Amino acid sequence: VTAATPTEQVLTMMQELKKKGEAMMETEQKTFATYAEWADDESKKLGFEIQDGESKIEELTAFITKAESDASKLGREVEALEAEIAQLTSEKKEATELRATQ
C-alpha cells in the first residue's frame, strides 16, 4: 500500500467537499421547493380571504343602506301615526265635551 501524495490527498479532500456541497445543495433545493409551495398556497388562500372580505363588506354596506332607509321610512310612518293619534285624541275630547253639554 502506497501512501497518498499530498496532491492526491488535496484532490481527495476536494472531491469529498464537492460531494458534501452537492448534498447540501440538494437538501436546500428540497427545502426551498417546500417553502415556495407553502408560500404559493398561503398567497392563494389570502387572496380568496380578501375577496370574501370585500364581498362581505359590499353585502353589509348594502344591508346598512337598506336598514337606514327602512328606519327613515318607519320614522316617517311613526310620525304620521302619532299625528293621527293626536288628532283622534282631540276629536275624542271634543266629542266627550259635546256629549257632556247635551
Image (cartoon, rainbow, N blue to C red):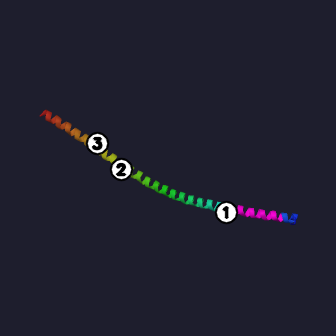
Residue 15: x and y in percent read: 79, 65
First reached walking from the N terminus: tag 1 or tag 2: 1
Q: Dots 1 and 2: beta carbons under 8 Å?
A: no
Residue 89: x and y in percent read: 23, 39
Query: Tag 3's secondary structure?
Result: helix
Dot 1 crowding, Cα within 10 Å, few <14, some 14–19, many 20+: few
> Can you say whether 6 is above or below 59 in the image?
below
Q: Which of marks 3 and 2 is in front?
A: 2
Q: Which residue is rendered at x = 78% and y = 63% of the image?
A: 16
Query: Tag 2's secondary structure?
Result: helix
- In the picture, measured across the screen, residue 39 lies left or right of residue 66, that is right
Residue 68: x and y in percent read: 39, 49
Q: In which quarter of the image is the N terminus?
A: bottom right
Furthest toward the front, the residue is: 1
Mark 3 and mark 1: Cα distance apart in space: 77 Å
> Can you say whether 91 is above or below 37 in the image?
above
Q: Which mark is residue 29?
A: 1
> Can you say whether 29 is above or below 95 in the image?
below
- In the picture, measured across the screen, residue 28 lies left or right of residue 62, that is right
Q: What stretch is highlighted in magenta?
A: 10-29
| Dot 3 amino acid type | Glu
Q: Which of marks 1 and 2 is in front?
A: 1
The answer to whether residue 28 is magenta is: yes
First reached walking from the N terminus: tag 3 or tag 1: 1
- In the picture, measured across the screen, residue 56 lies left or right of residue 10, that is left
Dot 2 crowding, Cα within 10 Å, few <14, some 14–19, many 20+: few
- Comparing 25 with 55, the one in front is 25
- Comparing 102 with 4, the one in front is 4
Main secondary structure of the magenta stretch? helix
Q: Name the residue under label 3.
A: 82
